[in-house]
Image: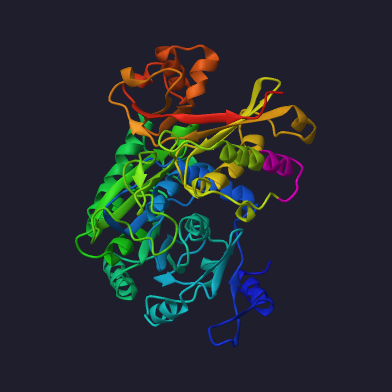
Amino acid sequence: MRTMRSLCLLAALAAVACDGDKTMKNLRIRPSAIAGSWYTDDKAALIREIDGYLSRVDTVLSNVVIRGLIVPHAGYVYSGRAAAYSFRQLEGRKVDRVFILGPSHYTSFHGASIPSCDAYETPLGQVMLDTGVVARLNKDPLFSDVPRAHDREHCIEIELPFLQRVLDEFTIVPIIISDVDPGEARELGALIKSCMGSNDVIVASTDFTHYGANFGFAPFKSNTAENLTKLDMGALDLALARNIAGIYEYARRTGITWDGITVTPVMIAALPEGVKGEKLLYYKSGDLNGDYSHSVSYVAAAFHEPAATPGRVDNGGGRAAAAGAPAGAETKRADGAAAGGMADEHPLTQQEKAMLLKIARETLVAHVEGKPLPDVGSLALTERLKERAGAFVTLHSHGELRGCIGYIEGIKPLAETVQENACNAATEDPRFPRVKPAELKNIDIEISVMSPLRKAGSPGEVVAGKHGVVLKKGWHQGVFLPQVATEQGWDRVTFLKHLGLKAGLDMDAYKSGELWLFTAEVFGEEKK
């Protein structure tokens, strides 16, 4: 079987690129080792999946500069939600380089290793290494060339598609770390720190406790879920406090199967003085499937320092900043217009509604029939349709729901949001099979354009038929559009009780969970 080094060599022979002075340069490409297994190898599906995770993040830090992140590295079905919580903190920010530190899963060696490639490749394209920084690091004796450490390794590559979705132009410095003692962890961290610029970020790619007989770690005889949480939080608290010696001692004392036991100390040693660590999200795979006999824990965390200019995120001319209150809360663009949907303040014109329905219909037909999607960018769109806004696309067939998916908040321009969710409603709603071409003639489309969300002070603020509601409690979340209450004939309490069930909670969850309210401008095609 060919090694990753031989694959890189073959790719280098086929790939050429022009540098700034027009000379030719052979690129050594590290092809994907996990596309099609750890995550989908279909570009469009991968984009939809990642953007879906990012759209459901409800914690976006504001008035801070992100310096470091803790991110898990399992398959997206397990760790994608936590990864989104970390990487969403970078969206709209100017980032030049990302130092990604990961543990070696397939071989043991001393120190650290960087792959001998110029770029990583994912279904979303190539990500270039900063070869200058790589050369500088490789001069240190703690770095060595260990090709087998990179052949099948997933912990670096799994992070790249998320970075490709939240950042514009950036380079990476991918580092696999194996055996290092506390002193060497500090030395590696100091070396990396000396290479980092003011717009650089460092990522510790790590899952937390691996529990169960298959992992050789099953010390708990009862209350496994609670004990796992306690064990993980003990490790995370030390990481957030940047206590390197404490992390090593904790691992020795507890036997925790945390694959970032060397990676995390190196990351925190590379961070600037005075950064604050903050947990963003924590859950276990056992929380998802109820099986704690074989469970892996996932953590999202950020290390940050105050922004130089409070209230402003410098996006460097890239995508609009989405920092501020919890996702879904109204955020402001630099020009003062509300982002995330403005159905109440600036209603759509009839022409704009017609354009969105046209986009949705033509996209639906093309997607279901396997044809190229319409080029939204080539259409004569109004400024309103170019603004970021949340929107849902709902499909009905013979008067019955056939699919409904959308973005609660404005993560993309409205026209693009409608196009993406016309596809999602047809083929990604887990409640229904994929729409078939023969069904198209019987399907009508309804679009709901969201207003900014606002947090309700009490359930009594909900007006059935007027308000859509997002219920959040722990890591559970459910949403009903305003028209659901009208269509079902529900009063406020019945509406909220059913929302609790949709969120995977009990019917009284609305009494203790967070309620976020929105209105929606709803319009659609003639019913078939």
Identified at 25% across, 47% down, the residue is 237
Which color mode does the image show? Answer: rainbow
Q: Which residue is pictured at 32% across the width and 17% down the height?
A: 460
Give the residue displayed 35% in from the left and 56% down from the top: 69
Who is closer to the viewer here, 215 or 66? 66
Residue nearer the viewer, 386 or 491: 386
Image height of 434 relative to 500, above or below: below
| Image quarter (top left, top right, bottom left or bottom right) of the C terminus | top right
Q: Is residue 220 visible?
A: yes
Look at the picture and state if 460 lies above or below 384: above
Residue 471 is drawn in which quadrant? top left
Where does residue 381 sit, x and y in percent of width and height? 57, 50
Count of picture labels: 0
Q: Residue furthest left?
A: 274
200 drawn magenta: no
Horizontal and vertical percent position of residue 350 = 57, 36
| Farthest-out residue, right | 438
Of 396 and 326, the residue lying toward us: 396
Quadrant assignment, res 202: bottom left
Q: Position of residue 47 (x, y in %)?
A: 57, 50
Locate the N terminus and report the quarter of the image it occupies: bottom right
Query: Where does the magenta region start and end?
Result: 361-372
What secondary structure prevails in the magenta region? helix
Residue 454 placement (x, y as % from top left): 34, 33
User: Is residue 365 shown in magenta?
Assistant: yes
Q: Is residue 248 visible?
A: no
Residue pushed farthest front? 350
Query: From the viewer's perspective, is 250 left or right of 465?
Result: left
Residue 159 is left or right of residue 179, and the answer is right
Residue 9 relative to residue 69: left or right? right
